[in-house]
Image (tube, rainbow, N blue to C red):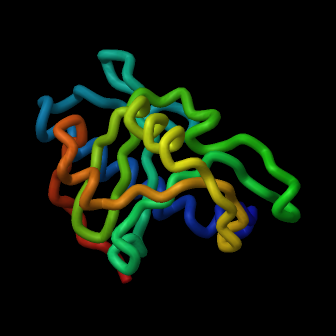
Amino acid sequence: MNLSNWNKDLPKGEKGELEVVFTLNGILGFEAFEKVEGNELTYDLKSIIEVKLQDKSEEYGTFCIEVADCRLNKEDRRPSGLATSEANYWSIIDETHIYFIPKHLLEAYWEREGERYFEEPMTWGFTIKKDELKNNPEVKIFERLCPKEN
């Protein structure tokens, strides 16, 4: 991922993290989760949640899951995303919903689908159809508390 895009997207990502915290606090009770240093959220059961914004997923009906990042070109491949995440769950936020997906489920999709190169944002990954996730009982889906900002 381009560093300037990362810096630009960081505030949106942090807002998404807070939205996940508020959603889960509403389900489990207040103070069930707390923000910790770094890029992840941890809570009292010691689960870690990776939070990703996918604000253009309505256009394609899929989520893109990164497994390697390419800083300079297609061959400059470095493990990232799902390949390096220590999270037990991934929370993917689209325009209207928050999806909570167990990591093992994403790893199974990766194994089944393989991976491919995405020119923009210079990353290797795979896609998952949102409809497939909606029909999976392991995936929990909640309406967003905060509307998408344009």
Q: Position of residue 62 (x, y in %)?
A: 39, 65
* Displayed quadrant of residue 53: bottom left
Query: Residue drawn at (37%, 52%), measured in percent from left and top?
Result: 92
Q: Position of residue 10 (x, y in %)?
A: 56, 59
Residue 148 in the image: above or below residue 81? below
Q: Position of residue 79 (x, y in %)?
A: 72, 41
Q: Quadrant of the C terminus?
A: bottom left
Tag count: 0
Looking at the picture, tell me which residue is in the foreground, 33 or 54.
54
Query: Residue drawn at (74%, 62%), measured in percent from left and top?
Result: 3
Residue 101 in the image: above or below residue 119? above
Q: Quadrant of the N terminus?
A: bottom right
Relative side of 65 to 89, left or right = right
Q: Position of residue 44 (x, y in %)?
A: 31, 18
Relative side of 94 to 32, left or right = right
Query: Residue drawn at (69%, 62%), measured in percent from left and top?
Result: 117
Query: Residue drawn at (61%, 69%), measured in percent from left and top?
Result: 8
